[in-house]
Image (cartoon, grey):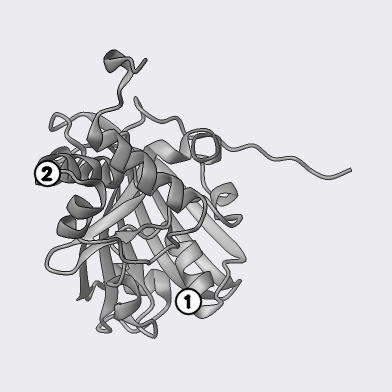
Amino acid sequence: MNNLFNKKPIYKVIYDTIAEKIYNSAYKVGDTLPSESELEKMFQASRTPVRQALNKLESDGLIYRSQGKGSFVANYKPIGHWITMTGFNHIYTKDWKKISARTIEVTKKTSPYYASLLKINSNEEMIHLKRIRTDQGEPVIYLEHFLHPDLSIEMFQKDPSFISIDQLLKDEKGIEFTTIKEQLEAVSADVQLAEQLKIEEGQPILKSTRISYANKSNPVDVTIIYLRSEKWKYAIEFNKGM
């Protein structure tokens, strides 16, 4: 006998079916999902549960949506060794499925200070990104990137939920970072940071400035990371092989 109390809601059926196909690589990174109307027909469901399922897939970091274009499979796996080069390896490894990223803005910008860190002319336009990383939908890290002008801006516009600059550059251009220099300091959240991180203005946060090099003399990316340290703890573990 069917137990009505154990019957799964239709939005959860849709979510689980799509999620399973993503995990099994039936839907691969970058693939376009069926449209909302196609999903309605496939699951014999109304628009509301379809949108509920897509919203949850997006908030869980499994898909991203582009207005007028559709829904796409996101790069949700912490592939590559880039996670070991952060202070959050312990979090990424343990709770990756709860974490997602989103690009807010992709522009070109001049800044004599960051140009000096990239060792380029002070008037050269760098690629400038603003990004948010969330944990179960709650903002934890706000990032700004200043990238070398020789890179293509289109690379960073294709998928707003790309996993990391490090992994993207490796996948798209074969660039691997060999040296990273990082400086940490405590700062107070200004109006913009408070808005992005959903915290009170003036709240203490951790600021990291990372310079990533393709070799010891060629910086490619300067990343400024603002961290809600009451949510995530920065930790480094070093193990020397014997």
Counting from the top left corner in percent of width and height, residue 43 is at 25, 46
Q: Secondary structure at mark 2?
A: loop
Task: Name the residue located 38 percent from the left edge and 66 percent from the top edge.
Answer: 30
Give the residue type at disc 1: Glu
Q: Which residue is mark 2?
A: 46
Task: Name the residue located 26 percent from the left edge and 53 percent from the top edge.
Answer: 42
Q: What is the quadrant of residue 139 in the picture?
A: top left
Q: Nearer the viewer, residue 70 or 238?
A: 70
Q: Is residue 40 above or below residue 188?
A: below
Q: Nearer the viewer, residue 188 or 17?
A: 17
Counting from the top left corner in percent of width and height, residue 67 is at 13, 64
Nearest to viewer (mark 2 / mark 1): 2
Q: Nearer the viewer, residue 193 or 163?
A: 163
Q: Nearer the viewer, residue 144 or 183?
A: 144
Q: Which residue is mark 1?
A: 172
Q: Secondary structure at mark 1?
A: helix
As drawn, the residue found furthest toward the front would be: 1
Looking at the image, tell me whether mark 2 or mark 1 is earlier in sequence order: 2
Task: Name the residue located 34 percent from the left edge and 18 percent from the top edge.
Answer: 2
Q: Tell me if I can see residue 174 in this picture.
A: yes
Circles 2 and 1 in contact, beta carbons < 8 Å: no
